[in-house]
Image (spheres, rainbow, N blue to C red):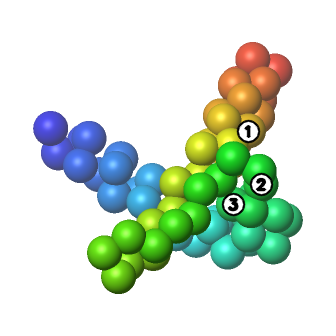
């Protein structure tokens, strides 16, 4: 169980570090990435970006 907590923590740290870099490349502003305001809070659902990055990770995994 502690292993999964560690993996999730490291993934969140990695995502928070890589997120600004991906924003400069345009990831997160693709058509299909939803950004809306609800109850006074801004919500962001990166549907297209998630699919694109998942496909890229899958290709890299198959290549290695």
Q: Residue at x 69, y 60 (%)?
A: 28
Q: Which mark is residue 52?
A: 1
**Badge 3: few (under 14), some or many (20 or more) residues near its Cα, within 10 Å?**
many
Q: Earlier in the sequence, mark 2 or mark 1?
A: 2
- As helix, strand or loop, the secondary structure at mark 2 comes to loop
Residues at marks 2 and 3, CA–CA distance in whole angstroms: 6 Å
Q: Residue at x 75, y 17 (%)?
A: 62
The residue that disc 2 covers is 30
- As helix, strand or loop, the secondary structure at mark 3 comes to loop
Q: Which mark is residue 28?
A: 3
Residue 4 % position (x, y)? 26, 41
**Badge 1: few (under 14), some or many (20 or more) residues near its Cα, within 10 Å?**
few
Q: Is residue 50 above or below residue 10?
A: above
Between 28 and 16, the one lying in front of the other is 28
Residue at the bottom extreme of this rendering: 40
* Quarter of the image with the C terminus in it: top right
Q: Residue at x 69, y 47 (%)?
A: 32
Residues marked 2 and 1 touching at CB (< 8 Å): yes
Residues at marks 3 and 1, CA–CA distance in whole angstroms: 10 Å
Between 10 and 55, the one lying in front of the other is 55
Q: Is residue 50 above or below residue 63?
A: below
Between 17 and 30, the one lying in front of the other is 30
- Is any part of residue 57 visible from this angle? no
* Quarter of the image with the N terminus in it: top left
Residues at marks 2 and 1, CA–CA distance in whole angstroms: 10 Å
Tell me which corner region of the image, top left, top right, bottom left or bottom right, holds residue 40: bottom left
Front position among marks 2 and 1? 2
Residues marked 2 and 3 touching at CB (< 8 Å): yes
Left or right relative to 40: residue 22: right
Residue 3 % position (x, y)? 25, 42
Q: Earlier in the sequence, mark 3 or mark 1?
A: 3
């Amino acid at each position: 169980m502690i292993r999964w907590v560690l993996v999730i923590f490291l993934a969140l740290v990695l995502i928070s570090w890589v997120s600004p870099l991906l924003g400069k490349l345009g990831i997160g502003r693709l058509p299909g990435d939803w950004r809306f305001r609800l109850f006074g809070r801004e919500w962001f659902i990166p549907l297209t970006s998630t699919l694109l990055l998942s496909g890229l990770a899958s290709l890299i995994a198959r290549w290695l």
